[in-house]
Each structure stands twice: as C-alpha cells, then as structure tokens.
Image (spheres, helix red, strand yellow):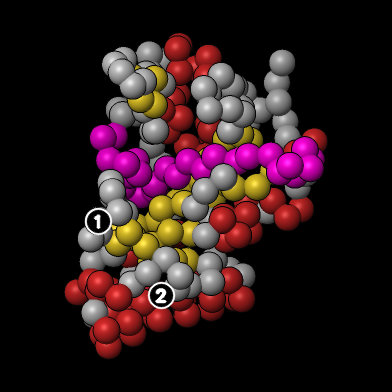
Amino acid sequence: MEREQAVIELKKLEGVDLRPLAKKYSVTVWKDGEPRRKNKGWAGHVLERHLGLPINSAQSPNFGSWELKIVPLKMRRDGTTLVPKETMAITMIDAYNVQHTPFEKSHLLAKLQKAVICARIFKDIDETSSPLFQVTTFDLGDSEIYNQVREDYEFVREVITRKGFEALTGKFGKLVQPRTKGPGHGSVSRAFYARTGFVAKILGLDKVRASDAPVQP
C-alpha cells in the first residue's frame, strides 16, 4: 500500500477509540504473566491490521516507501491542552554512516520525509481508551525547521568525529536529540529522537486545543 492511500485509510479512524479495535483485530494489549506487561506496540499493530498489513516485528513498522510512527498525547494539568507524552524515535545512529554522510543524504532526513505520524490520546495507565487524534505526514518545507534539524544532525557528526560515538548525549540538539536506545541504563546504542517540542510542531499542537479533538461516540 502506498503512503497516500494509507493516510486516507488511517484518517477514517480519527476520533475512533483504538482499544475496541484491538479486540476486533486480536491485538494483545496486556501480556499474561506476573507482573502484567503491556505490549508497547499495540496501537501500531491495530493500525497495521486495519490497513490489512502484516504486523511488523520491528519497533517502528516500515513499509518500504513509508514508515508508521505512533505518538501518544496526554492532557496538560489545565485540562484543555494536549501535548506529546514522550519523544519520538526516528532512526538508529550508525556512527560510521553518520560521520561520513551529510544531512541531505542522511537516514534521518529520509526517515522524516517518509513518516506517517499517528497521534493517539493516552487516557490512563491501563489503556482503557485511546482515541486516534490525528494522522499526518511531515513536511520539512519550513526552512527554519529544516535548518535546525540539519544543524542538530551536523553537530552530532562533529561530536562523533572529534570526541567519539560514546560522547553523544540526550542533552544535545534543539529539535532532534541523540540518546541511548534499548533496555537499561547501560545501553550503548544511540538513536535520533524528536524532542516533544518538535513533535508538537509536527502535529501543530500549538494551534489545537483538546476540545477540538474529534471523538466519535
């Protein structure tokens, strides 16, 4: 399925609670055992099943010409504004590749350009309900954003060259940060993550209030 068609089909679910669809499509949300463990990719699996695609075992489903990204949103304490609950993983960092590849030919740019980003509302820890809020694609046509993402990437290249891969830290980057990825604090893997403020820009949340969210009965 091409990205344009996928976006059309996914937009039909905007405002629809994904939790009942998980049951419909036989997607496990909570895994059996003690302690109970959540299937972190359940929402993405629901959307894949809805599109008639096989569930991808990769953490970020990749369909060749496009990639599905799921972003949970939470309500601010004021009860009126939705904000990203967490950062969004974009792509793993291969030190040699990044060091020898300019931004214009980078995996980071390629991943952003082919992403289909689906934002769902996180209601509670038990995932009793989770409406799909928005489906969008990312356009780096905004020169200010493009230049800042490029600057963040090129800074990572410089750090790898001058100080080494291990010197990368999540403190770097205004929009995109290079931080550890994987279980435990001893992880040596790094990945590019979109900071929550960047995710908010992608989704246009600075212009949307929670009361505007389309939710079907």
Which image quadrant: the N terminus? top left
- Give the image quarter of residue 58: top left
**Rendered residue at 30%/61% (across/down):** 190
Q: Which residue is mark 1?
A: 186
77 over 137 or under it: above or below: above
Q: Is residue 193 left or right of residue 76?
A: left
Residue 7: where, in percent of width, then height?
A: 52, 39
Q: Nearer the viewer, mark 2 or mark 1?
A: 1
Magenta segment boundaries in residue numbering? 56-81
Q: Earlier in the sequence, mark 2 or mark 1?
A: 2
Residue 71 shown in magenta: yes
- Give the image quarter of residue 145: bottom right
Is 10 or 8 nearer to us in this picture?
Answer: 10
Tell me the amino acid under the disc marked 1.
Gly
Q: The residue tagged with tag 1: helix, strand or loop?
A: loop
Q: How many numbered discs?
A: 2
Residue 181: where, in percent of width, then height?
A: 31, 54
The answer to whether marks 2 and 1 mark residues whose Cβ atoms lie closer than 8 Å is no
Which image quadrant: the C terminus? top right
Tell me the amino acid under the disc marked 2.
Tyr
Residue 164: where, in percent of width, then height?
A: 24, 79
Asked if residue 116 shows in the view, the reply is yes
Q: Is residue 81 left or right of residue 140?
A: right
Q: Which residue is mark 2?
A: 153
**Rendered residue at 40%/56% (across/down):** 90
As drawn, which residue projects farthest toward the bottom?
162
Q: Which mark is residue 128?
A: none
Residue 2: where, in percent of width, then height?
A: 41, 42
C-alpha gap between disc 2 and disc 1: 24 Å
